[in-house]
Amino acid sequence: MYLINITVNGDITAVEHEALFTRHVSWFQQYFNAGKFVLIGPYSDRERAGVIIAHTESREELDAILREDAYHPNLAEYEIREFIPKMVGNWQ
């Protein structure tokens, strides 16, 4: 599994961000529906930033998915960390 921190560059205007964000939402909804993204959400303490937990067959598959994001490659920073889940709680 992968933890992806996405931070949109601060030099994007509000108008540009709004236009790109609509495409960004469609992108993450597509991969959530496909079961590749299992958790998605914005940070509550930081604007234009959020987290995705992804489950893909490989890092190459994840990289291909990320290349489809409206902010890729130069309009956001993507910090990607691979992890092995050991415990999962029921929090809902």
Image (cartoon, rainbow, N blue to C red):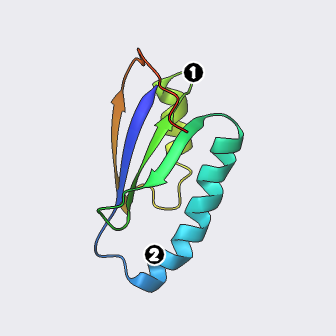
Pick the residue in front: 46 or 69.
46
The residue at which mark 2 appears reads as 17
Binning the other alpha carbons within 10 Å of mark 1 as few (below 14), some (14 to 19) or many (20 upward) gives few
Secondary element under disc 1, as helix, strand or loop, is loop
Return the x and y of residue 53 as percentages of the image width and height.
Answer: 47, 37
Is tag 1's residue or tag 2's residue first in the polypeptide sequence?
Answer: 2
In percent of the image, x 41 and y 83: which residue is there?
A: 14
Residue 22, disc: none
Q: How many labels does the image show?
A: 2
Determine the image quadrant of residue 75: bottom left
Residue type pointed to by label 1: Glu
Determine the image quadrant of residue 57: top right
Look at the picture and state if 6 lies above or below 35. Answer: below
In percent of the image, x 37 and y 57: which residue is there?
A: 43
Image-based side of 4 in relation to 27, left or right? left
Look at the picture and state if 37 lies above or below 18. Answer: above
Look at the picture and state if 36 lies above or below 25. Answer: above
Look at the picture and state if 23 lies above or below 43. Answer: below
The residue at which mark 1 appears reads as 57
In percent of the image, x 30 and y 63: which residue is there?
A: 46
Quadrant (top left, top right, bottom left, bottom right) of the C terminus: top right
Residue type pointed to by label 2: His
Image-based side of 39 in relation to 6, left or right? right
Return the x and y of residue 47 as percentages of the image width and height.
Answer: 34, 68
In percent of the image, x 41 and y 14: which residue is there?
A: 86
